[in-house]
Every structure is written in structure tokens, then in C-alpha cells.
Amino acid sequence: MKPVIFPPEARPLLSLEKRAHQSVSECSVVEVGGDYMVVTSTDPLPLKGKLLFEGQAYEYSKRGEHQLDDLHYSELSLEPENAAQLQRSLLARLPAQELSEWILSNMGDPPAQEPKSHFSAQEENQLDQGLVTRVFEFIVCQLYQKAWLSLLLLILLSIFPISQLPKLRMDPSLDRLLVKNSPEMLYYNKSLAIFGSDESAILYVQDPNIFSKEKLKTLRSLVWDFQKWPEVERVNSVFTSSFIRGQDETLYTEPLFQNIPPDDEMAGMLSLVQQDPMLHGRLIDVPKNVLVFILKLSPENRGLHHFAKKVENKIAPIKPKFKKFFQTGEPAIELFETHEMEFSPKIFLPLIILILFFSFTFIIRSFHAFIITLFAATLSLVWSFGIMTWMGIPVQIMIILIPTITLSLSATEIVHLATSLRSAWQKDLFGLEALRYMSRDVGRPIFLTFTSTALGFLSIRISDILMLQEFALVSFMSLILVFVITLLYLPLHFRLFGPKESPVPKADHPFPQTAKAQGGFENLKIFSFLQKKFHLYYLNSFFSRKAAFVFGVFIILNLVLASRVKMDNDSFEMIANRTTVKKDLDFFKNNMGGMKEIHLVLETENESLLKPDHLKSIWRLHQRIEAMPQVVDVQSIAGLMALLNKEMRSGFDKDYKIPSSPNLISQYMLTLSRDDVDPYLAPDKMSANIRLAHDISSSAASDQFIESVEKILSQLIEESSLRGIVKTNLTSRNILNLHAAKTITKSQILSLVTMSVVIVFLMAIFFRSIKIGLVSLIPNLVPIVGLFGLMGLLDIPLNIGTCIVAAITIGIAADDTIHLFSRYFKDRALMSDPFLTGKESIYEELIPILSTSLTLSLGFLTFAFAKFIPLLQFGVLSAYVLVLAVISDLYIGPWVLTAFDLKTMKGTRHFFTYLLNHRCWHGTGELAQLPLNERMQVLRAGVFNG
Amino acid sequence: MKFLSVLVAFHLSFVSLSSQAKCDKAGPDIMKAQEDAQSAKTEEESQQIVILDVTSNKKEERQLKRFSSKKDSKNTKLVLYFNEPATIKGAGLLSWKESGEENQWLYIPELKKLQRIASGSRKNYFMGTDFTYADLEGENLDKNKYTCTGEVACQKNKSKCYVIEAKPINEAEARNIGYSKRMLLVDKKDLITLKIVFYDLRGKKLKTADYANWTQVGKLWRPNLAIMDRHGVQKTFIKVGKRQLNKPIDDLVFAKRYLQKEMHIK
């Protein structure tokens, strides 16, 4: 039938169904066609709603709008049968002449043609049909029709990864925290080759009767057994380390308790050892009844956790005999990490699966999506871990994050697919048609969101730290593979399990529901109630000066706090205080100290350091460093020489110095073996090593300490007190950790910049506008500012866990921005007012954005149970940033969109005019005339339109 | 030095362990026979020592003089002192074993002091070389358990050798000397030890001693070259110059005042 056009004076009035924030209540009908209607109203109509006429409600969706003077002309899309019914009802309102003309013009009209597509014309216009979409659609539809191909591909592609899985290995090594092949690492390895290992396991034993014969014999036997272990280069202990002392006119060099002294001699020995600077306070503490064994590990020894386990098994039967007996040091930390790596997934994974089950079942209401998510994520992990093993990458502490991350992220993407499919079913589109609809509806955004998220993880690859490089690669792989597997499996799944007829909720939900429970959560009364309340609050605060003020203060405050953020890569600081290993570390630090070492290497140019002048230089440096409060112990060739001199001469402190005679030094050296000297003096005698023992933990404190040592060096050089020393270098694992920490800041900035560029690029491609790409970055950067602000406030450092939060969450947050922007521009085509478009697009995207972001946040929050602090911080901070991202998307997103839109229309000045005056809570126009309390009542009632 | 070039040739060892025949004697008997055959009542030697660091290839050269006097296994005296280099000239070691009890003194010429040192640490390396004090004592038949594990061809197949495993009699002795065991290659005919492989307390090969350039002094055989290779760390070469065996040595040489009065320094 031809459209019915009403003259201005005879246009019928239709009412609109009342909505909370809606100001317009009626409209005039201009024209009614086969599936559309044109109406006028004084205010813009909502995008969707119901028209009421003669007791009937007709659902419409707006296709377009145009403002002419004070009137808004809206083109509404109707179901054909509704349009026909309305037409018939409204025909009676036509004046007689127009009615006659219409009847005559309809005679002989060709029958209405069936639409070529199963989608309505409006849908055809709204659904994307770009290249990505077409490819997506092609793959999905082909695999739906050839489900066997889908199954075959899944099986074939699984063969290789599964074949690699038996070779999967775990590596909790702290070496992965370091920067490989850096100049610092090369120098460190060189010094290891010369001066021996600085890696050690420490055993702390305390007992009131520790110096009894029986207990000493037990411990001596234990130490002797340790000496036989191939992993152990040397054991420093009172049973094995030289105790140089003069006694009864005899020089003794044998260990203190190589032979257990008789009871009557014990007190004397203990008194003597308290005067030995090389042993007391390091290997023995007589007043505290403490003995310490330092097991120096061979540099070739890899797998500190295996060693720690071996030590634990060895000391287990002996431990009960002593009041306190524990192992500490880096091997113990690696053993702890191994336990965490084995144990944590048993907590995180069930939790995240539970969260997803709850979310999918009760909120999203799609059990299909839950199954697809589980399948796709699991298979993706199998493939990723298989390929990772083939590449030689082991499972390390960061990689255990990946299963939870993959599950969470894939869930949020698959939700969109499921929601789109539900829409298709509600339009009576099933099977292939439903998949086609889904591809055109969300195919391209899904592709983009997966890509942006995966690239967020890949950007971490920029880091110089091996652990992060591996994490970046494997997580990227996992996310890409999830997308691929989803493409492969989804058609197969719906071919086998998808609904064939009406959208029966039973097929989509494990719990049978009544017809009223169709669709998603929005049909649940509690959610409807909450949604209305939230909408009301949000829209009252939306585009308000108050919100602008709050955000402004938030950004400025966080920028200031962000300047306080420091970096930290110290492995000791990465363990939660509540753990036994950390308690032991702290106990040792407080009672004995000196768990860590820094090596100060001094070099000459073709001169022997055994010359008196050089030894005196080393001695001066030794003493200055020893005086530093952070230093527990210092050992050097000079210290050894001074001790020998003291014991050879008088035994008094006045001889505790370097002899001036080169001959005497050479003769003293005759009493020392390579084993005594090697840790402190290179075989060519041109470089010497001063070992500083300390307990400084954080990278920041270590950095300060290093600066202090360098200051001492500079002072001595200025005073010409280090004559002959041409080069000084600080090295040790400590230093390497510090160096790695410094790279974290650099890589953080780089990965953020990279991600920002990627987002701009993706958005620019998606929306075909570089300006939109740039504008889209703003709501995504605000949460990052909030992140660093919180870190600065709570003294959370940049470490391997926190440094990845920004890059990852910006990629995830961009997903919501893509959906929001996408919705805005779709709606913008239908509405003339940018502000209302902003409001409407948020109204539609609010719940999907909130539900996916909250699900994701909860997923990340599962890491709050981790005992490895970087993981804990990663989880909590990521959850925080995602919540901030939602808030930013809800407020700042529409602001920037509207500002951008207005700029192109009227200029940015008008945006601020609107923001601050037209739409502010004071109101304008009629509203402004009301007294304040009445004005507030109007606003609270939800009549909000300036 | 010439004898350094011998190293490579010597280390192309003529030992073939692939085919071991059964021993015709027990280990203790072989070692007792060796002690009886090769013991001298007195020994006097001039030695040239070269200590080579394997990593840096740096050498230290020393010259020392050595005197020993042996009444029996429980009563021995030893004195040695350095003549070169000048920095350590006159530094010496005096060792007495009287009725099994050991005493040692170290003379530091710069301090003009004869310092008694604890004799308990036989596993300590002697004067920076790769020989420990225990190595220098020679075989102690009472403190080791010897087992002959087989006979092999040696000396470029010109001779046959016993392969003898020497293990300390108990763990305490093992700790004292620092070895879990030693493998000796003993020439069957002359009962001289051609090679010793030392194993540390972990059972890992620690060092190898090769004895070469054997000369016969009267009925006794002595090596003029000893090479101790502490694998991957250091090598010590000891070349013997002048040697006298079983010639009378003045008791004064073994007295404390010999070193204290610097009678040994010329």
C-alpha cells in the first residue's frame, strides 16, 4: 500500500509510552508507510519505544531525525503488520478528499515484495558488511554448514601442541627477573667465573644448647654431608671455614669446630671466636646461640628450587632437635615460587570458573556462552602451552596468570557473540541466518576488541626482562588462539546444540524458565529495579558541573600522586609477609643479617694488587664500607691479610692492618691456599673483590646504597687513596635486579605509548577517522592516571606484576570504548542532538559494559589470594583500573564524543556552554524560573532536559 | 721452561685401563713392598717449582731446598725452605713427627719469627701449590686401606702396572686429608707410583699427579718431574735438580734454630 500522508491541520496525535527520563509524551503523525512512520514532536523521540493508540501499543525504533525550527521530525521503523494496522486505524482520520485520492492511487499497486533479506531494511543498513565482517561471516557460515570440517580442524590443530605438552617444564628461577645479555649481566658472569658464585642457601640454627657436644656433632655431620653434594661449591660454617687465630704460641687455621673441643675448652674457644671478624656475626653468634651455614652453590647449578627441596628433606629429621632451624635465601624463595606455581591455579581457576558460571547463568543468561568460553579458553591454553614448550619457554610465575586471564577475557568477548545471537533468535532468525546476523552485528567489533586486547599483552614484550617477554608472547598467543578457536568451535556448537525454532529459553539456560524469563538479566525484576535507579542517578549526574569538577580533581590529584611511584624488582620484596618463607627471611635479617651480597671489583692495569700500596687502598675502602650502617659484613683480601698480620705478630688490634713490606705479604700468602684467596683475588692478581653483605631489600633502597658506595669511591679517589686502582665496578645479583628494575620504567612508558598508538590506529580504522581515533584515547588514559595515582598513594611500586597492568587494561578498556563509540555513531545517524545521542548510547550500552567489566574485574580480583605480591598487585590494580575505565567510559567517553561532534558542528565552546549552563543542575529556561526546591523536585522526578 | 713442554707429551698417558687383569698381590702387600723398596733414610733435593694458573696462564716460579730424615713411619723430620724468589727467600717449613705426634713450624724471615702452626690441617695446600701437606708426607700405610683392582699395561706398553685404590680408613681421616679416595698406578717391576688420581669428598675427580723422568739412585727410584694438575684451576710442576739419598744430614738442619738463626739463608 502507498503511504498515507496527513496534512498539517489533520495530523493525528499519538501518545508515547512513558519512560523515566523521557520528556516527550506525544507526537503528530505526518506519514504512515508499509513499515515506517514519520512523526513530529516538540522534543526528540527516544531511539526505541512504544506508541499508544486506541488502547494498542506499537513498538518502534527510530531510523532518523531532523529538526526544523522547533519541531523534530522523526522517521520511525515499525513492524509491517503494526504499520498496516496503524494505517488502517489512522485512515479514518484522513479528511474525505485526501482519503478518496489515497484510495484511487492505491488501485492497481503491485503486491508488496518480500524483502530480499531476512533482515529488515533498517537492519540491513545498520549491520556492517565490511571486509572483516565478510570474512568472519564466511568462516562462521561455512563451518556451520560443514561442521565436520570444524571438528577436523580442531583435532588436527591440536595434535602438535598436545604432543609437546609432556615436555612442559616449570622454572621458578629468579634469573628470569633479570635482563639477559646486558653489559651488567656479562660483567656479572665474568666476575662469577673469577671469584666464584654469590648464590647461596643459608641455614639458620638456634638453640640454647647449640654448643653442646651432641648438637655440634649432629650439625657437623650434616655440614660434612652437604660438602659432598655436587651442587655445593663450598660450605662456609664453623665446621669448615678457616678460623685464623694465634693460641698458645701456635697459629691455627683449622675450622673452629673441625674437632669438637672438650667441655673445659669450649668456653675459651667461644670467647676467642667472638673476636674473629670473619666468623662472628656471620657464621656464629655466641650470645644468641646461633650457627649459620652458608652453602655456596656452584655457578653451573640450575634449579635452585630442586636444591632447596633437597636441603629441606635433609634437615627435616634434624629440625625437631633444635629450637629454631630453617632454610632461607634465594633457593628457599624459588622453592616457595614453585609451590605457588603449583598451588595458585588450583585457587584461581576454580574461582574464575565459578564467577563466570554465575555471570553467564544468572546475569547474561547464556549457558551456551559459558560452555563455548570454557571450551575455547581450555583448548587455547592447551595449544599455547604446547607451542610455548616447543619454543623452549617454561612455566614461570607470570605465566600462571595466563589461564585466568584467558578465561576472563574470552568470556567478555563471547558474551557479545551470545547477546547478538539472542537478538537474532528474538527476530526469529536461526541456524545459518542467526550466525550471519551475528557476524554482521558484532563480527568486526569482536575482531577489533580481541586484537586490541591481545596487542595490549604483546606490547609488554618491549620489556628487557625475560620473564615479562615470555609472558607477553604466551598471553598474546593464547588470546589470538582463543579467537581462532571460538571461530572454529562456535558454528559447530550451535550446529549441534543451538535452537532450531523459537527462542526457547530452556535451550539457552540450564534452569527451565517461564516465558517471562526470556532474554537476559534485564527481565529480572531485581535487575530492572537496580537498572532504573542507576539510570536515574547516572543521568542526573551526567553532563553536570559536579561530575566535571570531580573528574578534574581526580585527574590532577592522581597526576601528583603518580610522581611518587617507584620501581622495585627485588625478589625478597615479592613475597607476602604472611608466608613462612618471608617470616624466615625477616627473622634472619633481624637476627643475623647479611643475606645478600654486593661485589665491589677493583682492577689495576698490569699491576699486582698484592703490592702493599694497593692492599692498603683496598683496606681503606674495606673499612669505610664496613662503617656504613647498612653493611653487615665486609670481606676482602685486605681483610684476610690484616687478620693474618695481627695473628702472626702480636694478636692485638694494633697489628690488624696491612703490612708495609711486600716480602712479608708474599710470605703471608704462602700460608694461604687458592681456596682461601680465590673469592677475593683473581688468579692474575690484577683484580680484587670486596664482598659486602647486607640486607637491603627494595630496589629504591638498593639504589641509594649503591650511590653511597659510589660516593665513598669518589671521595677516596679524590683523596688519592685508591692509587693504582684504575677501574671499579659493582656487581652481583642484587645489582642485576636493580638494573632490571630500572628498565621497568622505560618499558612501562614504551608499552603505554605503543598501546596508545595501537588503539588510535584501530579506532581510526574502525571509524575511518584519525580524529576519532585520537579522541577515543582520552577515556582510556584517565584510568591509567588513576592507576598510577593509587600506586603513588599506597606506595605500590612498579614491579613485574604492576608494570603490565597499564598496557593490559588499556587494551581491555578499549573494548568498551569501541562498543560505546560504535553505538554512539550508530545512534548519531538517527538523532540530531549530540547530547541526547550521548545519553541514549550510554543508556543502551550501560548494562553490557557494566556486566562485562565487573565480570572481568572479579576475575582479576581472584589474584588477591596470591602470595606472590606482584600477582596480587596485578590482580587488584587491574580490577581497580577496569572499574575506573567503566566510569571513564560512562562520563568522559560521551563528553569527548559530544565535544568532538559539537566541534564539527558548532565548535567546542558550545560544548562547554552546554555542559556548564544548558545542562547543568541549575537548569535553564522554564526550569530556571522555578524556586530551587521545586527545581530539585523536578530533577529528581527524572524530568531532565534543561 | 723445557719441562713444561713435557706436559703435553706426558699427558698423552700410556695407561690403558681398558683391559685389566687380576692382581697377583693384595693392595697392602704391594704398598708395603713399595715402602720397603723405595724408602730412604735421608733425602736432600733442590727443587724448581712452577705454579701455573690455567685461566690467566700466569706463572710463579720458586726454588726450594728440601731435607728429610726418616727413622721409621712414626719418626720423621722434614725441613724445606725457599731460595727464590727474593720476596720469599728464607721462608721455610719445619716438620717433626715424633712417636706419631706432629709439630710444624713456619719461618717468616720478614718477621724473623718461627711460628708454630697447627698440624691438624693436612688437607691444606702447601705454600700455594697444588700439593697438600698430606700429599707431601707420602703413603701412610696405617691410615689407608689399599685394594688392588687390577693390572694394566703402562709405560707405553713396556711395563705392567697395578691399579690400586687407596681409601682413608675412616671418615675422620678422609676429612683430614680431604680425599674420599685415590687411584694409584704402581709399576709392577720397580714398585714406583707413576700416577695418582685424587677424588674429593664428593667423589668427584679433584686433581691428578703424574710422576716422570725417573732416575735410579742406587737401588732407589725417584721422579725428577712431578706434575699436579688441579683440573681447570692450577697446575704445579716440580722439577728436581740435585738429589742425594741416604747420605748423612746434620741434625742441625732439622733443628728449630737452623731456621731461626737463618742458617739456611745464603
Image (cartoon, coloured by chain):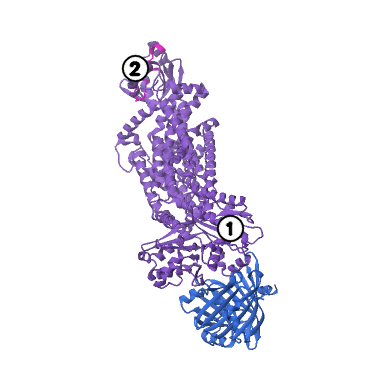
Chain colours: A purple, B blue
Separation of marks 2 and 1 at Cα, in angstroms: 85 Å
Task: Relative to B75, say whether B209 is above or below.
Answer: above
Residue found 48% across the figure and 23% down from its top: A911
The three-letter code of the residue at mark 2 reads Pro
Decide whether residue A16 is among the magenta residues.
Answer: yes
Q: Is residue A98 above or below residue B127?
A: above
Question: In the shown orientation, is residue B5 left or right of residue A226?
Answer: right
**In x, y percent, where is residue A77?**
41, 25
Element class at badge 1: helix
**Crowding at label 2, few (<14), some or many (≥20) Cα neighbours within 10 Å?**
few
Q: Which residue is mark 2?
A: A931
Q: Which residues are magenta?
A: A8-32
Whether discs 2 and 1 lie on one chain: the answer is yes
Circle 1 sits on which residue? A618
Q: In the image, which disc is placed on residue B234? A: none
The extreme left residue here reads A514
Q: Give the percent coordinates (x, y) of residue B125.
A: 56, 72
Asked if A186 appears above or below A224 in the picture, the reply is: above
The one of A131 and A855 positioned closer to us in this rendering: A855
